[in-house]
Each structure stands twice: as structure tokens, then as C-alpha cells.
Image (cartoon, helix red, strand yellow):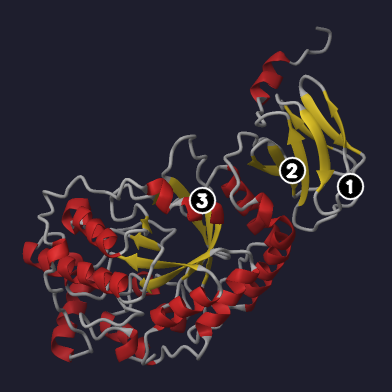
């Protein structure tokens, strides 16, 4: 993940690769064996993206709305941001020494899964390999992996088991870009290097798709320095679906995939009839990996607002935690997600399985919808009344969800006004008004601007 620009960098890779060649630093550069299921010539499979049964495969995902992202790797030991290896110009052979310090405590993944469930999340996505090139899973293609280095065990396996024990859907993040592999940069201009590196990449993905049971999401990241043809992305996706027929994949291997991934901003809205989804991924501070100096934490209210806005546009919200090197979750993350979870206990049904909501304009509220029921999430409580301008649909009734208190409705041509509210917000993060309409709620504020009578008219 990167919220910064992808520069032309990797000058250190040449030196790093040379050092690897002479230093014997626990690195194997093996190509994956060819497999009959993936032997299709990439030019013949060029048009393959994902299977046609997208609506069926993504049904659970659209229902879920809220997931946990986990960035966990050697950078978690360093505690200086997940891009420190590049941003600080750390030599590869020096960075590799972190693998002996990376020793997550027993049960680390169970704490992640418990917190995800408590927060109201329905799925999890963990970094199996980030840009640093270290594999958190077992593989015969490199010794630069968790079972053969400091952890001494398969961290991905522990994550999968923990997620399933809490009823979470399981996702794997995989970075195509690799700062450690000797061919990770030169593959862009050396065909032999490209062949080796693509075989290596496909082989690692095959391992992930083969050894952990049913996997629900494959989350590619950063395709630098190749395009879809160079990565043989059609062949890659075909292999993935051969092994995991029900999986969904994102768009970051340069193919459209099943869903797009706006980063650090709310995307959407999804167009009606479009069965290809979108998922906003965000950090809770400004870092994906653990960064001990980053104290710019989002408030629980901000997190809830972002979740509401994602659901309003028919999208999902994938919120990141960056565990420390031993797997512990930073206290601010626990505090934020605990508060969000308390809100979700009361109001989760306004988020899960919500429909695309055309009503979206307010200075103090966000909206979600299920059928003809409009949910007005008031996060900046204005006092004794709230109003929606340009609501074109008749309101039949309204109530405060938390208390069940009926709310009086005054509706005119240009405004729906809900009066008699308590002066203090009943809920800390967002108070929800459940508004029953006689049809799908529709809002037109431009109509208000243009047609509302002016003074003296």
C-alpha cells in the first residue's frame, strides 16, 4: 500500500542483488514449476479477467460492507512506516537482518480476529507479502519466508485459522512489486529476468491459493514495473480461479477484476446494475504498517462517518490496523475499533446489506438505505430538529432508532423537517433516524436551488 507516488527508484536493487549473490543471505530465486492448469499461452488468455458469475461470488461481500486490513511484516519490527526500506534507502542486506527479530507472540492472530468481530467487521485481509518481499507463508520458492526465518512458523496459517474461528471471511493481500528479489526491477527491461520473476510470482500465488483451504479474496497491490501483459495477469487470474472458483479479486494486477480499490478516500457511488464493486481502503492514522511516531489517529466518529459514506455509495470499507512486531495491536487502534463496535451493535443493520442510496446531501448527516427505508445518520447533532432539503419522496413516518421515539414530520415541497428531537444527541458517534418512505427515497437539491420561491416572487 502507498499513499505516496510510485517513483522511479530501485537504484539500490542492483547493488542489493549483487550483495545477495555474494553474501549468501538466505535467499533462493527459484522458478515455479510449470503446471498444466496454467500452461495457457498468455496471448491466448489475454481477454480473461474473472468468471462471469460475479454477482454470485460477490453476494456475501456486498452484504458485509466492513472489513479489517492488516499490514504485518518486517517493517512492523522497524516501526518506521511500511515504506521505510525505500524511503530511507536501507540496503537490502541490512534490511534482511530484521527477519531474525521478527518473532510474533503466540496467539497474535486470535487477538486480531476477536477485535475485528467486536468492531462489527465481517472479513479480514492480511499482507502475505508486502513490497519488502518477505513472505509470511510457507513456500519452497524462497528461504526469505516466515517458517525459515525469525518467526519459525507459518504466520498466514495462524491468521487463517484465527479468522475462521471468529466467523470472518478470509482475504490475502499480495504485492506484485518486490524490493528484495534480484529480478524485481530489472524484469522491466530484461526478458530473461521477467520470465524468472513472473514464474516466481505466479508460483507464490499458487502456494497461497493451494494450501489454506477456501480463500474469499485475493487483494493484489502495486504492479510496478510491469503491465498486465508483462505480468501475464490473465494467466494469473485464470490460475487463481482454477484453484479457488468462488474467490473475488481486485483490480491491481492491471485487469478490471471484481472490484476497484480507492485508497485513502471514499469512492463511488456505484451505478445501478453494475455488479463490479468498489472498496475504500484507509488507515487509522497515516501509516499502513506500524509507525511508532505516527500519532495522527482518526476519531471513532470519523471512522463511522467514512463507513456510512462508503455504504451510502454501495461500497465497502476496509480499515487497516498496523500491528507491532510481536503482533500486538497498538492501543489507539483497539480503542477506536472498540468504540466503533459499540455503535455497530446498535446500528449495524443500517450498514450490512444496505442498498445504494441516492439521498446524500447534508451538512451534518450521512444516509444509507434499505428498500424504501431511509436511515439518516446525524453525526453533528444540530439540536431540536433536522431537515432534508429536496426530498422528493413522501415520508410516512420516522423514529429515533436507539430509543424508538417517534419523530414528528413536517414535509413541504422543498423540505422534510423532523422536529421534537432531544437537545442532546442520543448516540455519541451518530444518531440514526429511521425514515419510512412511500417509495425509494430520492433527493434533488438542484431543484431546490432553481425552483424554490425567492423573496418577493
Against 294, residue 413 (above or below) is above
Q: Residues within 10 Å of mark 2 (few under 14, many from 20)?
A: some
Q: Residue at x 50, y 91 (%)?
A: 106
Q: Which residue is mark 2?
A: 364
Quadrant containing the C terminus is top right
Q: Which residue is mark 1?
A: 405
Viewer-closest of 56 and 330: 56
Per the image, label 1 sits on a secondary structure element best described as loop
Quadrant containing the N terminus is bottom left
Q: Residue at x 36, y 80 (%)?
A: 136
Disc with the residue nearer the chain's start (1 vs 2): 2
Marks 3/2: CA–CA distance = 26 Å
Against 405, residue 214 (above or below) is below
Residue 128: horizontal and vertical position, in percent?
Answer: 37, 73
Residue 2: horizontal and vertical position, in percent?
Answer: 41, 61
Horizontal arrangement in the rendering, residue 380 relative to residue 332 (left or right): right
Against 146, residue 48 (above or below) is above
Q: Which residue is mark 3?
A: 62
Q: Are marks 3 and 2 in contact (CB under 8 Å)?
A: no
Marks 1/3: CA–CA distance = 30 Å
Per the image, label 2 sits on a secondary structure element best described as loop
Viewer-closest of 281 and 354: 354
Disc with the residue nearer the chain's start (3 vs 2): 3
Residue 148: horizontal and vertical position, in percent?
Answer: 29, 90
Evaluate whether residue 227 shows in this view: no
Residue at the far top in the pictured view = 457
Horizontal arrangement in the rendering, residue 130 relative to residue 450 (left or right): left
Please tell me in which quadrant of the rendered image residue 392 appears: top right
Q: Residues within 10 Å of mark 1 (few under 14, many from 20)?
A: few
Residue 439: horizontal and vertical position, in percent?
Answer: 68, 29
Disc with the residue nearer the chain's start (1 vs 3): 3
Amino acid at each position: 500500500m502507498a499513499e505516496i507516488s510510485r517513483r522511479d527508484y530501485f537504484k539500490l536493487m542492483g547493488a542489493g542483488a549483487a550483495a545477495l549473490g555474494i553474501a549468501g543471505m538466505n535467499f533462493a530465486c527459484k522458478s515455479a514449476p510449470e503446471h498444466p492448469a496454467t500452461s495457457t499461452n498468455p496471448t491466448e488468455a489475454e481477454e480473461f479477467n474473472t468468471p462471469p458469475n460475479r454477482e454470485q461470488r460477490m453476494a456475501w461481500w456486498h452484504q458485509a460492507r466492513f472489513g479489517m486490513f492488516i499490514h504485518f511484516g518486517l517493517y512492523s519490527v522497524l516501526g518506521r512506516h511500511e515504506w521505510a526500506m525505500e524511503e530511507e534507502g536501507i540496503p537490502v542486506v541490512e534490511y534482511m537482518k530484521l527477519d531474525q527479530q521478527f518473532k510474533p507472540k503466540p496467539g497474535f492472530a486470535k487477538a486480531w480476529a476477536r477485535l475485528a468481530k467486536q468492531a462489527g467487521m465481517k472479513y479480514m485481509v492480511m499482507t502475505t507479502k508486502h513490497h519488502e518481499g518477505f513472505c509470511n507463508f510457507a513456500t519452497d520458492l524462497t528461504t526469505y519466508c516466515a517458517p525459515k526465518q525469525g518467526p519459525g512458523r507459518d504466520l498466514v496459517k495462524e491468521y487463517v485459522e484465527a479468522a475462521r474461528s471468529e466467523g470472518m471471511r478470509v482475504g490475502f493481500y499480495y504485492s506484485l512489486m518486490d524490493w528484495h528479489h534480484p529480478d524485481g526491477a530489472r524484469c522491466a527491461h530484461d526478458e530473461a529476468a521477467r520470465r524468472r520473476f513472473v514464474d516466481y510470482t505466479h508460483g507464490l500465488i499458487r502456494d497461497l491459493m493451494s494450501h489454506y483451504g477456501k480463500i474469499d479474496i485475493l487483494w493484489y497491490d502495486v504492479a510496478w514495473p510491469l503491465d498486465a501483459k508483462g505480468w501475464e495477469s490473465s494467466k494469473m487470474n485464470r490460475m487463481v480461479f482454477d484453484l479457488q472458483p468462488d474467490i473475488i479479486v481486485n483490480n491491481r494486477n492491471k485487469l478490471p477484476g471484481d472490484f476497484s480499490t480507492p485508497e485513502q478516500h471514499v469512492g463511488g457511488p456505484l451505478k445501478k446494475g453494475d455488479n463490479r464493486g468498489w472498496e475504500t481502503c484507509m488507515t487509522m492514522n497515516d501509516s499502513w504498517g506500524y509507525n511508532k511516531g505516527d500519532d495522527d489517529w482518526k476519531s471513532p466518529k470519523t471512522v463511522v462517518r467514512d463507513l456510512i459514506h462508503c455504504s451510502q455509495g454501495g461500497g465497502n470499507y476496509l480499515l487497516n490496523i498496523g500491528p507491532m512486531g510481536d503482533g500486538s495491536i497498538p492501543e489507539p487502534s483497539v480503542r477506536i475499533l472498540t468504540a466503533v463496535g459499540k455503535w455497530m451493535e446498535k446500528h449495524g443493520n443500517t450498514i450490512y446489506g444496505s442498498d445504494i442510496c441516492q439521498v446524500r446531501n447534508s451538512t451534518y448527516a450521512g444516509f444509507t438505505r434499505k428498500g424504501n427505508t431511509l436511515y439518516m445518520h446525524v453525526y453533528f447533532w444540530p439540536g431540536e430538529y433536522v431537515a432534508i432539503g429536496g426530498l422528493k419522496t413522501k415520508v410516512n413516518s420516522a423514529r429515533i432508532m436507539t430509543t424508538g421515539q417517534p419523530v414528528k414530520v413536517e414535509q413541504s415541497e422543498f423540505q422534510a423537517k423532523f422536529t421534537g428531537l432531544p437537545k442532546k444527541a442520543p448516540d455519541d458517534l451518530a444518531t440514526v433516524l429511521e425514515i419510512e418512505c412511500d417509495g425509494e427515497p430520492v433527493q434533488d437539491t438542484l431543484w431546490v436551488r432553481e425552483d424554490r420561491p425567492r423573496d418577493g416572487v
